Image (spheres, helix red, strand yellow):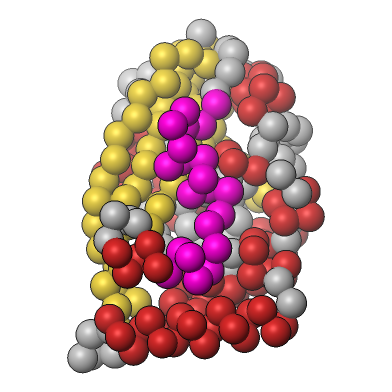
Amino acid sequence: MSADRATSFGAQAENYEAGRPEYPFEAVAWMLDAMPHGSRRIADVGAGTGKLTRVLAQAPGAEVVAVDPDETMLATLRRSVQGVPTFRGSAERLPLPDASLDAVVLGQAWHWVEPVAASAEIGRVVRTDGVLGLIWNIRDERVEWVHRLTEIMHSSPAENLVNGPEGPRIEAPFADAETQTWEWTRPMTRTQLHQMALSRSYLIAASPEERAEIASAMDALFDEVGLGDGTIDLPYVTHAFRAVRR
């Protein structure tokens, strides 16, 4: 995958924060349930603006750090999730000591990493019996108009990976990956819908003319299926995966 697309999100940090959905607490709790009892040292890798970080911080006794390669994204995170230490780094190169964590989690990020190198590096910083957790919020394209929305915006690497036949690739020293899904709906205004689209890597890299065409088609779809209160109910499926370090 394009390294430029993987590191392009800082240019749209504010739209990412406003337009992307939060993670269901129960899905995040499920990932962490596999940790050894009482352990709560967690790194959010590819943390972005802190969408997942703020949910992790709600876990009782959690000690959370955030890692991302983009300083602009981390600056937004520090404003929205105060008190969480932040570090520049990536899943393949973590600025953290050996066996210092009970869990590493990635939200909307594993599709940007090299899975063999990332699994090995995360295995270095996670202690034996610690957890690697992966989570994605994916629009429910079983709904006809949502499928049309994706055709307008173009599919993303995340959607292609999670909806594909094999799912995310997790390598040694992690084993026995488990998965669960949660279905829910997010009310969104027209502005939020556009902010969500603008935060996607395809639109960040698109020309101004193509972005304008996509925005116009999204407006037409919103007018067709939007609710009378000026919102649209966008259905999501949250996909979570967890694997234990052996």
Quarter of the picture containing the N terminus is top right
Instruction: Depth check: give the residue in front, 205 or 151.
Output: 151
Task: Residue at 52%, 16% (x, y): give it.
Answer: 174
Tell me: residue 159, above or below residue 94: below
Task: Residue at 64%, 63% (x, y): give it.
Answer: 202
Res. 82 visible in picture: no
Q: Position of residue 133 (x, y in %)?
A: 46, 32
Furthest toward the left, the residue is 228
Q: Position of residue 112 (x, y in %)?
A: 65, 43
Instruction: Depth check: give the residue in front, 176 or 84.
Output: 176
Instruction: Depth check: give the residue in front, 116 or 148.
Output: 148
Task: Give the magenta-colored segment's residue range.
Answer: 149-169
Q: Hey, which quadrant is residue 117 in on the image?
A: top right
Tell me: residue 40, above or below residue 112: above
Q: Position of residue 236 (x, y in %)?
A: 32, 57
Q: Position of residue 148 (x, y in %)?
A: 40, 68
Furthest toward the right, the residue is 4
Q: Is residue 116 magenta?
A: no
Task: Residue at 24%, 51% (x, y): give it.
Answer: 183
Instruction: Depth check: give the residue in front, 88 or 91.
Output: 91
Q: Is residue 158 magenta?
A: yes
Res. 142 visible in picture: yes
Tell me: residue 154, above or below residue 24: below
